Amino acid sequence: MVSRVNRALDVAIAGVGLVVTSPLLAAGALAVKLQDGGPVLYRQTRVGRLGADFELLKLRTMIVGAERQGAGLAVDRGDTRITMVGRILRRLSIDELPQLWNVVRGDMSVIGPRPTLRYQVDRYDDRQLHRLDVRPGITGWAQIHGRASLPWAERIELDLWYVRHRDWKTDLLILVRTPLALFGGTYRGATGGWRDS
C-alpha cells in the first residue's frame, strides 16, 4: 500500500514538474542544439533498483562522443569535454530535468540515491549493495549534503543512511532543501545549518 502511494506521488510530482519546467527544458534543448548541432538528449545505461539496468535521460552537456575521449565515463570538475552551454546546464541541474520522464516511466523516483554506472556498482561490497534497495532518485540525501563535491565514499554512506532511515519527513526535508543546495548552499544537518559549496 505504501509503495503504491509513493509511486502515485512520484508520478504526480514528475508530471507537474515536466509541465512547470517545460520552458526551461525547451530553452536548454535549444541551447544544446545551437552550440554544436549535435543531439539534444544524452542516453546512458545506469543501474536501478535491485540492480536492474535502465536508460537514463539527460540534456547533453559534453561534446559528442565524450565517453570515448579523455577520462571516458568518468567526469571530473573542470572536465574540458563539457561544453560552455553544458557548464551552465550542469550548474543549475537543468540537464537532469529529462529524468522526470524516467520517474514517470518507473525507472526512478523523485527522491533516492543517484543512479550509478555498472562499473561502480560492481565495486560495491555487500553492505553498499543495499544502496540498490530503493529506486534511484533525481535528488537525495547526498545531494543536499554536497552533491558531486563530496568524496565518492561519503556519498555512498549518505545514501545508505537514507535507505535505512527514509520516511515522509526525510523526503519532505530533501524536497525543501534541494533548491537551496542547487544555488550554492550545502546542508550540514539540523545543527550545522548551511555552508557555501
Image (tube, rainbow, N blue to C red):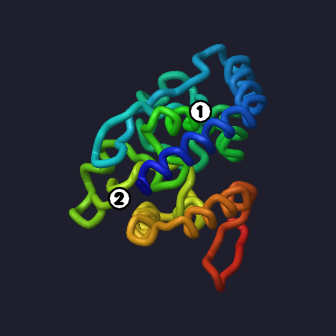
What label does residue 131 carry, if any? 2
Q: Residue at x 44, y 43 (%)?
A: 74
Query: For the view shown, which residue lies furthest in the bottom direction?
Result: 191
x, y (%) of residue 21? 73, 36
Crowdedness of circle 1 by 10 Å Cα count: few (<14), some, many (20+)? Answer: many
Q: Give the distance between the C-alpha atoms of the residues marked 2 and 1, in whole angstroms.
A: 23 Å
> Can you say whether 119 is above or below 129 in the image?
above
Asked if residue 81 can be seen in this view, the reply is: no
Q: Residue furthest top?
A: 37
- In percent of width and height, residue 162 lies at 45, 67
Image side of residue 77 versus residue 165, left or right: right
Front residue of this view, candidates 162 and 30: 162
The answer to whether residue 143 of the structure is visible from this angle is yes
Count of all numbered marks drawn on residues in the image: 2
Indicate the quadrant where residue 193 lies.
bottom right
- Place residue 61 in its image quadrant: top right
Work out whether residue 129 or residue 133 is closer to the camera in this orientation and state it.
Answer: 133
Query: Secondary structure beneath disc 2?
Result: helix
Rendered view: 125 above or below 59:
below
Left or right position of 8 against 91: left
Percent x, y of residue 151: 47, 64
Q: Secondary structure at mark 1?
A: loop
Q: Residue at x 55, y 37 (%)?
A: 99
User: In this rendering, is residue 124 above or below 16?
Assistant: below
**Mark linked to residue 187:** none
Q: Amino acid at mark 2?
A: Arg
Residue 98, numbered circle: 1
Q: Is residue 77 above or below residue 161?
A: above
Residue 34 figure quarter: top right
